[in-house]
Each structure stands twice: as C-alpha cells, then as structure tokens.
Amino acid sequence: MPGQDFKKESPNIPITVDVPYRFAAGKYLSKFLIEMRDNGVFYGIQCPACGRVQVPPRVVCAVCHVKNETWVELGNEGVLKGFTTMHMPLTDPTTGKPHQPPFAYGTVKLDGCDSGVDHMINPAANLETIKIGMRVRVVLRPKQDRIGDLSDILYFDPIEG
C-alpha cells in the first residue's frame, strides 16, 4: 500500500536552530536592571494594598492584582529558601553558555523582599555546606563589565556564620 513504507521508516533531519531574541524590559524591570548595573543596588516594588515587596519588580502585585508604585531599596544579602544541586550543565539564558556541574542553583529572598530571585550559588562553594535558611550575599560583575541584565549577578555567595 502506498505510504506504508514511510510509516516503517521515519527519516529525520538533525538541525540546530539558533533563535536569538530580545524583548523590551519595560519601565519597572528597566529601573531594577539599571540601578543594579550602575549602582549595584537592588530595588523591589511594594504593593499598596498588602505591602508585599516583589523582586524583580512587577507593575501589578502578584497577590492583590493592584498597581505597584512604591519603590523600596533592598540589601544585597538574603536567605536561601530552596536549592537544587545540578549534575548536568545548565545553559545560561542570557549568555547561551553552559554552567558546568556540579553546582547549586537556588531561590534567594533578599532582605526586605517577599519574593525570591532564582540564581546560582557560588560554584566554588562546598556543596555539602549549602543549606536552606543560610545567609547569602549577591556577587555582581565588576561595575565596568555590567551590561544591565540578570547575568550581572554572577552568583550568591554563602555567608559564613
């Protein structure tokens, strides 16, 4: 029957597709990225209804759905809320380069903030000492090398003690 041989043999064509893409950060995320790039300072946005502070900032509160307009300066330290140990390379979406395993990737709640930032933990850190609840400090690229995106955060470094 016509077409029957095709069902037995399904040819495929291997191809790598590279689709670089840029999107406008918008007013709120732009302020966050520019302050981080130029001043090494993190800003969150506070909901006028529930008081929740979000990072990265959003125009509308994720809980109340109310427009946010109050900016809050945050510290550069926080608490590790959760993490995973990666045993496979993870491609950085902003650079396209893989991070070589093993390393930890986690969610950090910056001081003064109610939401988390997902990022790498210092790849040189002893994986056995990384714990939920530990204090961490952000490590940024040197000021002259910052480009104004989340890759300006190199990693979060565990704080001893």
Image: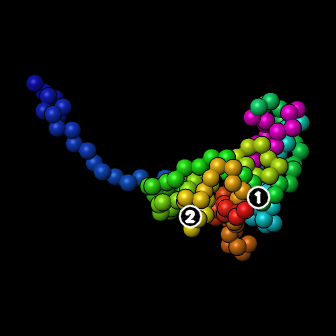
Q: Residue at x 70, y 73 (%)?
A: 142
Q: x%, y% of residue 58? A: 76, 42
Above or below: residue 94 compared with residue 145: above
Q: Residue at x 75, y 54 (%)?
A: 78
Q: Residue at x 59, y 49 (%)?
A: 83
Q: Which residues are magenta?
A: 49-62
Q: x%, y% of residue 9? A: 17, 38
Give the residue type that dot 2 points to: Asn
Q: Residue at x 64, y 49 (%)?
A: 132
Q: x%, y% of residue 37? A: 75, 64
Give the residue type that dot 1 points to: Glu
**Residue in the foreground of this view, choosing between 28 and 118:** 118
The image quarter containing residue 95 is bottom right
Above or below: residue 101 compared with residue 110: below
Image quarter in which the N terminus is found:
top left
Would you say residue 51 sits in the magenta stretch?
yes
* Label 2, residues with CA under 10 Å away: few <14, some 14-19, many ≥20: few
Q: x%, y% of residue 121? A: 61, 59
Q: Which residue is mark 1?
A: 77
**Secondary element at tag 2:** loop
Label annotation for residue 126: 2
**Residue in the foreground of this view, choosing between 91 and 109:** 109
Would you say residue 55 sits in the magenta stretch?
yes
**Secondary element at tag 1:** strand
